[in-house]
Image (cartoon, helix red, strand yellow):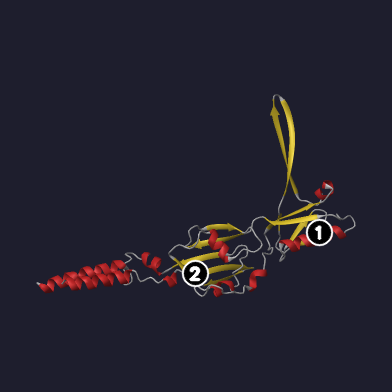
Amino acid sequence: MKKIFFLLSISVIILSSCSSVADFNYFQDTANGDVNHIPTLTEAVTVKPYDKIFIFISCKDPQLAAIYNLVTVTNRIGNQSGNISYSNSSSVTSYTVDENGNVEVPVMGKIHVGGLTRNQIAEMVKKRLTTSAEGVKDATVTVEFANLHIGVLGEVRSQGVIAIDRDQFTLLDAIARAGDLTQYGNRKNVKVFRKNGSKVQTYEVDLTNFQSVCQSPVYMLQQDDVIYVEPNKVRARQSTATGNTLLTPSFWMSALSVGLSIAVFLKK
């Protein structure tokens, strides 16, 4: 009787702890000293329709530069000690890229920025300023993104919207910002949804294989990408009505209880 109980107990312990580290470890194909080529590293975030961007032009003559900047002026009227005071402040306003990839810049008119990086836009604007008849010869042009973001859903520690704050924002950057995957995240099949016009394309990435990650078209993320980490088998089993399937510890504990009852009955 004791022998039967011992064997059944050992079986339950082994089966209930059979999750492999292969399901949890990242980059299992790498070793110390490995060199991996990332062909997409030179890619940078480019402007798409309906993005918001800042274009700020400066030079030695502030009044000359001011006519090229899109500025919002805020007026304030105050009353202090019976005296009425008037003040105003200004700030640079972002441009919204239209459906054709264009923005309307003061004095310069319509310029096409769709498909360009921040640096490419800055160089183009500076060239137009310095070569025009009334141009700003010593112009400095700064371009920044205003609202670029990606979404992260599923089995991560912090779901939500993450701002893209650099020209090259990777899938690993996004996972780190989301606090990593939970223990229930499927590391072998992370999905990335990318919108292209009226279509949405799905990509799958295996985080346990570094080559799969760095060779993926979505290693370098773009604005509006959505990352979804699906639940692994453990989480899927927990989502059943009882969670009592062949692969759960609760099933084997129940089986152990039944087995012991049968063994006691047969011994009588």
Which residue is tagged 1? 126
Where residue 6 appears, x then y in whole percent?
Answer: 22, 71
Number of residues whose C-alpha sits closer than 10 Å to that of mark 1, classed few (under 14), some (14–19) or many (20 or more): many
Q: Earlier in the sequence, mark 1 or mark 2?
A: 2
Which residue is tagged 2? 26
| SS at badge 1 | helix
Where residue 24 appears, x then y in whole percent?
Answer: 45, 68
Q: Residue furthest top?
A: 82
118 in relation to 11, above or below = above
Where residue 120 appears, x then y in whole percent?
Answer: 75, 64
The label on residue 148 is: none
| SS at badge 2 | loop
Q: Residue furthest front?
A: 33
Q: Quadrant of residue 140?
A: bottom right
**Number of numbered markers:** 2
Quadrant in which the N terminus is drawn: bottom left
Is residue 68 rendered to the left or right of residue 184?
right
Residue 245 visible here: no
